[in-house]
Amino acid sequence: MKTLWNKQQEIDFFVSSMKIATPEQLFYIADDGHYYAYWPKNYKGKTETLQSRNAFIGSYTERWCKDLFGEIAKEMGGYAVQGVVCEEIGLSKKSRADLAICKNKNTMQEPEDILFIIEVKMSVVWNWELKMPGSKKDLVCLGDYRTHQGNPGLLRSDTMLKGIGKSINIRVSSDKASRIPIIIIGNTPVTQSYYEKVDHLRKSGVVQGFWSVNPSPLDDNGENIKNTPHLGFYRFDSFDELKDNTISLLNEERKFFSSMQSRKSLGRIIEIANRENTFEEKAQRFLDLIRNS
């Protein structure tokens, strides 16, 4: 059984990264020589912004998500593929999909072979201190994100805006992207200022959800949102819950559409579409008319 994001994943990240990176690339160094993953809230010394860790945590979390979703993809007869390129739907070599579930293992994909797009927006959540007595390296957890000065994962406004922008670019690139679900994966909640936004984005179909795969981002049973009112944000507490929701999205045929019409034009489109016999035929006629109007 796959486990979701937890403190052990962050320990694994630091341990594996220190095989190829120096502590100075992964930790802040305080005035007193202490190594911190984030500046503690009570730290009053000189601070700086650590950029070098971003590439390491980005690479680690994308591989971790590939492994997590790989089992789900296999059950659906597909493959979890990193760095997918599909120019037709706005996924260029400079703006690849972090991860996608596809019908084949190729990096270069056709729109009809992409089943699911996943943008990975994860980071180190807890604060860690690296202690190096002698030749040993020990990691000590100092607390959850309430105890440090950083805003990890989906708590960052710039991270949210990048995820939203990427999704909109895919949606407006081609009608061939209209059937592909897009999920933004994180390991933190979203801030309260984004509750209405993520719900609106889900209801409008731009994205199908901002999902957190970290069941317990706060220590000591801290208040931790499970979901927003309309499920724009959703926190998963088990792999089975994640698998069931992903498979449900993959199995349910949907279409994204957007338009700005006058009431008269929209009424005409609805009237014409309503002449079809079945719900499915009415929907298809409506979509065709919207696209061609």
Image (cartoon, rainbow, N blue to C red):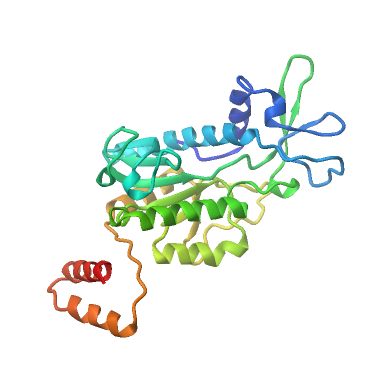
Q: From the viewer's perspective, tell me whether residue 287 is left or right of residue 2.
A: left
Q: Nearer the viewer, residue 85 or 5?
A: 85
Residue 27, position as x, y percentages in the image: 71, 32
Q: From the viewer's perspective, tell me whether residue 185 is left or right of residue 32.
A: left
Q: Nearer the viewer, residue 244 or 145?
A: 145
The residue at 29%/85% (across/down) is 264
Residue 247, position as x, y percentages in the image: 33, 48
Q: Up-down: is 135 above or below 39?
A: above
Residue 33, position as x, y percentages in the image: 84, 28
The residue at 42%/48% (across/down) is 241
Q: Nearer the viewer, residue 222 or 245?
A: 245
- How many numbered marks appear? 0
| Residue at the top extreme, as displayed | 135
Q: Up-down: is 187 above or below 79?
A: below
Q: From the viewer's perspective, tell me whether residue 292 is left or right of residue 204.
A: left
Q: From the viewer's perspective, tell me whether residue 195 is left or right of residue 182.
A: right
Q: Quadrant of residue 82?
A: top left
Q: Quadrant of the C terminus?
A: bottom left
**Is residue 73 in view?**
yes
Residue 69, position as x, y percentages in the image: 40, 39
The residue at 41%/66% (across/down) is 204
**Is residue 1 in view?**
no
Q: Quadrant of the N terminus?
A: top left
The residue at 42%/54% (across/down) is 169
Q: Nearer the viewer, residue 48 or 224?
A: 48
Q: Up-down: is 230 above or below 96?
A: below
